[in-house]
Image: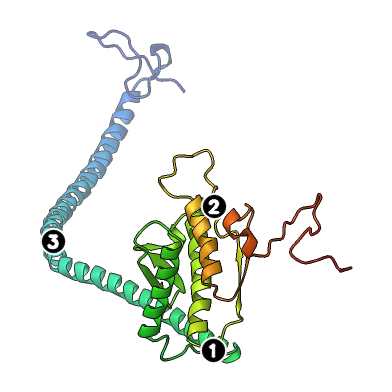
Amino acid sequence: MTCENLKYPALGEAPCVFCGAEPQHQHPEHHVAESTQLAASVSAETRKTADLLGDLLLMIEDLEEQAADIESSRAARDEELTHNAAELRALDQRMQPVDTDATELLNARSRVESELARHAQIEQLEELKASLSTVAPALPTARADGIPAADIADFECVIHETLEAWHVPGNNRVRYDPTTAELSVDGQPRKSRGRGMRSILHAAFAVSLERRNTACDLIHPGFVVLDTPVLTYRRPEDPDEDRPELMTADVAENFYRDLLENPPGQVVVIENPTPPASIRGHAVLHAFSEDGSKRQGFFPPRDR
């Protein structure tokens, strides 16, 4: 269907403003109906838009009220958070001593637990010790009285006289310790001396013990065996450093002479060097050697 072409002197021929038809397709009176419909449509749309605008304004008003409420609530929340933060800081300050006390209590608890563990271990060891002591054989008890001081002093004097008779250098002040059975001469323990001096002191101890027991009618086997008592001894002033194990003639000779003149009993001396010539006629000498000797050792062969 086409509409009649409209003549507009000012605009000339143009498409229909209502339906968009070209001039050749336009019909007369078409614009009247279209104008009526357009007015109705515009009125309807205007009412609808007005209604929407009213709704929008109400919504905006409601949103503004909600925004105001939210802002007020946020301000209250901020104030509450500030107050809570202040209270937390105050609580932290109040809790600091409590934290310190708790740390100290934990440390004390740890120490107490450690001590308890040690005590428990000690109790276990004590129980183990008690169980072992009941099984182990009892050790012999030492004499309650010990050696009388007078006997110790007398024994020390005998050793001093023996060292003086052998011409051992020094003052020869002797001290005997009954708890360790050791000698100290001139303030030096026997075990701290050189090998040679230890041998001399050991020989003096054995000889003096036999002499005193014999003089006091005490028990003794009646003989002494000395193994190389003078081989490694030399005086400190001996300049012969290349031969440190040689015996000085005066101590060795006086050693043998004292045993001959004041014999404590039978004395067997096993020594590497040959004894001095002055005593060879007064003692029984046996040379031990594998080549050209009648006797190769201390004990005779079995066939003899």
Going 48% across and 53% down the picture, which residue do you hit?
250
Q: Earlier in the sequence, mark 2 or mark 1?
A: 1
Quarter of image, res 243: top right
What separation in Å lies between label 1 and label 3 (alpha carbons)? 75 Å
Quarter of the image with the C terminus in it: bottom right
| Residue 226: percent from left, percent from top | 60, 66
Toward the right, the furthest residue is 303
Q: Secondary structure at mark 1?
A: loop
Query: Is residue 177 among what the camera can see?
Result: no
What separation in Å lies between label 3 and label 2 (alpha carbons)? 88 Å
* Crowd tier of the residue under label 1, counting other residues whose Cα lies within 10 Å: few below 14, some 14–19, many 20 or above: few
Residue denoted by label 3: 89
Residue denoted by label 2: 232
* Front in this rendered view, residue 289 or 14: 289
Image-based side of 25 in relation to 56, left or right: right
| Residue 297: percent from left, percent from top | 76, 61
Label 2 vs label 1, nearer the camera:
2
Question: Label 1 near label 2: C-beta < 8 Å?
Answer: no
What's the residue type where badge 3 is placed? Arg
Image-based side of 49 in relation to 19, left or right: left
What separation in Å lies between label 2 and label 1 (alpha carbons)? 38 Å
Label 3 vs label 2, nearer the camera:
2
Q: Secondary structure at mark 3?
A: helix
Going 64% across and 53% down the picture, which residue do you hit?
272
Image-based side of 45 in relation to 256, left or right: left
Q: Earlier in the sequence, mark 1 or mark 3?
A: 3
What's the residue type where badge 2 is placed? Thr
* Crowd tier of the residue under label 2, counting other residues whose Cα lies within 10 Å: few below 14, some 14–19, many 20 or above: some
Residue denoted by label 1: 140
Going 40% across and 14% down the picture, which residue do you hit?
22
Query: Is residue 192 among what the camera can see?
Result: yes
